[in-house]
Image: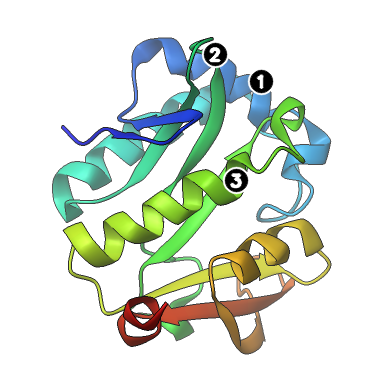
Amino acid sequence: MVTIETPRLILRRWREEDVAPMAAINADPEVMRWIADGRPLEEPAARRFTTLVEQRWEEEGFGLFAVEVRGTGELAGFTGLAVPRFLPEVLPAVEVGWRLARTFWGRGFATEAAREAVRFGFEDCGLDRIVSIAQIGNTASERVMDKLGMRVERETTTPATGRRVRVHELTREQYDAR
């Protein structure tokens, strides 16, 4: 069971009590604006999400961490690694991603958590390349990608939604050189 601690956060596997706060995060239209087709998700989707995430941990040896705020125990959202099946043209690939409740935006939590997810991917999982994908216009996520040392690799369109995205990448060589 992988748990990673940062100065302000705990990155850990999912628990049953995470479903309700994750459902609230997914129900916020501003949070979901840049995710998939931009529509908020209902509570059953949060339950399916956490179940699928735990399945992927077992199958792939990595996954999305629940991000807990140290000291308060609040679920801030998630960060971690996943195969971006929604964008087949970049496969094989592993993506670092994140989604936080609006109350945690602008505090550096996404960067702090994602930096540890990238480290985990390269150092513990032995990955050679990590990508991150943002819909064009999602400048906040692209700033996080920049802070992680990622650079734009391509622009394309997601098949399911028709939305334009930028694919950013970081190779092991670039990571090791930092």
Q: Which residue is mark 3?
A: 110
For the question of whether residue 82 can be seen, the reply is: no
**Number of other residues with Cα within 10 Å of mark 1, as a class: few under 14, some 14 to 19, many 20 or more:** some
Coloring basis for residues:
rainbow
Q: Which residue is mark 2?
A: 20
**Number of other residues with Cα within 10 Å of mark 2, as a class: few under 14, some 14 to 19, many 20 or more:** some
Task: Where is residue 83? Give x, y as percent.
Answer: 36, 63
Name the amino acid type tagged 2. Ala
For this rendering, which residue is in front, 25 or 46?
25
The quarter in which the N terminus is drawn is: top left
**Number of other residues with Cα within 10 Å of mark 3, as a class: few under 14, some 14 to 19, many 20 or more:** many
User: How many numbered tags mark residues here?
Assistant: 3
**Tag shown at residue 148:** none
Name the amino acid type tagged 3. Ala
Task: Where is residue 88? Give x, y as percent.
Answer: 44, 78
Q: Which residue is mark 1?
A: 24
Instruction: Tell me if 178 is positioned left or right of 137 in this view.
Output: left
Residue at the image point whose x is 46% and y is 55% from the top: 115
